[in-house]
Image: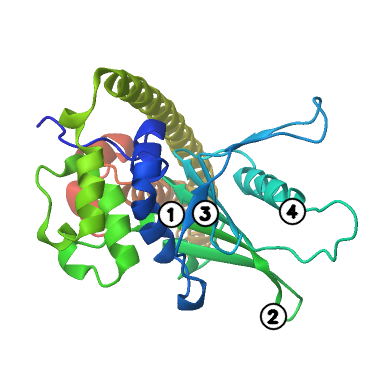
């Protein structure tokens, strides 16, 4: 079915929904869904998203969206479509520009306005060791001391891991839930769901409707969509290749380990039987048992990896009943 609304994970789509003057109500509403009640935004001003260094030779920073609220607090909003080396370091680097630009000439007391860096991620970080971190959608980071107490509360990083958001429409409980559901499913909608009939979301759908774009915007969107698809295909291929290489390595290591364990077990059993039946016969039986254990070990790993029964039978020589009993 042909898409009715744009893909918000494209650069053009994300900025069309949140980064234009006419889209300011959506951005304010989205950011307020991330902030505590005491920090709610009343007004926003878009700022130049290209930040230069102190000299022409310094590295610059280009944000997707950069804005300031009524209190002078700064907000950087970034869409990140694929994993990138040192992405966290990049966001920390980006946050230094809104801090530096607050410096005043002459006498200044160093009182800084808050800086927020928000990342909408179409991937998950893979270095969380346990739940609930692994499956959480929102990750909020502040500077803390060795006792876990916030040392400085004016620098906040918020990462939204979109693949972890799995709620269905009937499960949406908060305003943030609605925004995450909107972002994740927008391209698949054919009509505006009833829960999005308020003024802010209605306008967001109007802005995102492909049929209402002029020729220039359509061409820009098509180019942005092509870049998105090319990047996604490259990333998916890298993941698939890494998985296949890991599978092959795992099978080889499993085969080697299984043979070693099986031989040791078989030889031990053979030696015990050899007391009664003879060392030669015992060793032979031990070898056979070792090979059988090796086949069972490989089959267990193959089942964990998701290989089908027929493939496991061909790989190990075990019967379907033996495989099912593992």
Q: What element carries label 1?
A: strand
Query: Could you tell whether 184 is left or right of 20 in the image?
Result: left
* Mark whose residue sits in front, 3 or 2: 3
The percent coordinates of residue 181 (x first, y second) are: 27, 56
Q: In the image, is residue 322 above or below residue 3?
A: below
Residue placed under numbered mark 2 in the picture = 149
Vertical arrangement, residue 163 with respect to residue 239, above or below: below
So how many labels did they put on this image?
4
Q: Distance between the residues labelled 2 and 1?
A: 25 Å
Residue depth check, mark 2 versus mark 4: number of the one nearer the observer: 4
Query: Alpha-carbon distance for marks 3 and 2?
Result: 22 Å
Q: Measured from the top left, where is residue 212 in percent x and y?
A: 18, 31
Measured Cα–Cα span from mark 4 to mark 1? 30 Å
Choose the circle earlier in sequence order: 3 or 1. Answer: 3
Q: Which-is-in-front pick, marks 3 and 1?
A: 3
The label on residue 161 is 1
Q: Is mark 3 on a helix, strand or loop?
A: strand
Identify the residue at the far right of this view. 106
Q: Residue 102 carries which label?
A: 4
Q: Which residue is drawn at 12% across and 29% down?
A: 2
Q: Distance between the residues labelled 2 and 4?
A: 26 Å
Badge 2 density bin: few <14, some 14–19, many ≥20, Cα 10 Å = few
Q: What element carries label 2?
A: loop
Mark 4 or 1: in front is: 4
Taking 151 as reference, is 308 above or below it? above
Residue 118 shows which numbered tag? 3
Q: Residue 148: in sight, yes or no?
A: yes
Residue drawn at point x = 21 percent, y = 45 percent = 205
């Amino acid at each position: 079915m042909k898409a009715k609304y744009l893909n918000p994970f494209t650069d053009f789509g994300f900025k069309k929904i949140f980064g234009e003057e006419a889209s300011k109500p959506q951005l304010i509403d989205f950011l307020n869904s991330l902030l505590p009640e005491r920090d709610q935004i009343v007004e926003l001003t878009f700022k130049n998203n290209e930040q230069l260094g102190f000299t022409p030779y310094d590295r610059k920073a280009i944000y997707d969206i950069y804005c300031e609220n009524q209190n002078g607090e700064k907000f950087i909003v970034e869409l990140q479509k694929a994993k990138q080396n040192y992405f966290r370091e990049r966001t920390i680097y980006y946050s230094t520009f809104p801090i530096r630009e607050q410096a005043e000439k002459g006498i200044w007391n160093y009182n800084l306005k808050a800086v927020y860096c928000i990342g909408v991620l179409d991937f998950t970080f893979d270095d969380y060791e346990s739940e609930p971190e692994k499956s959480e959608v929102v990750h909020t980071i502040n500077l803390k001391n060795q006792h876990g107490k916030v040392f400085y509360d004016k620098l906040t990083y918020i990462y939204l891991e979109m693949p972890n958001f799995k709620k269905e429409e009937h499960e949406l409980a908060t305003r943030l839930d609605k925004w995450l559901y909107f972002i994740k499913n927008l391209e698949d909608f054919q009509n505006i769901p009833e829960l999005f009939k308020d003024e802010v979301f209605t306008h967001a759908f109007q802005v995102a409707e492909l049929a209402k774009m002029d020729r220039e915007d359509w061409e820009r969107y098509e180019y942005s969509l092509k870049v998105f698809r090319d990047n996604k295909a490259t990333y998916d291929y890298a993941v698939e290749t890494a998985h296949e290489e890991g599978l092959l390595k795992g099978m080889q290591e499993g085969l080697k380990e299984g043979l070693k364990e099986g031989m040791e077990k078989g030889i031990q059993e053979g030696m015990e039987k050899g007391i009664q039946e003879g060392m030669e016969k015992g060793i032979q039986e031990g070898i056979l048992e070792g090979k059988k254990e090796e086949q069972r070990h490989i089959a267990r790993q193959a089942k964990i990896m998701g290989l089908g029964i027929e493939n496991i039978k061909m790989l190990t020589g075990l019967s379907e009943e033996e495989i099912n009993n593992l």
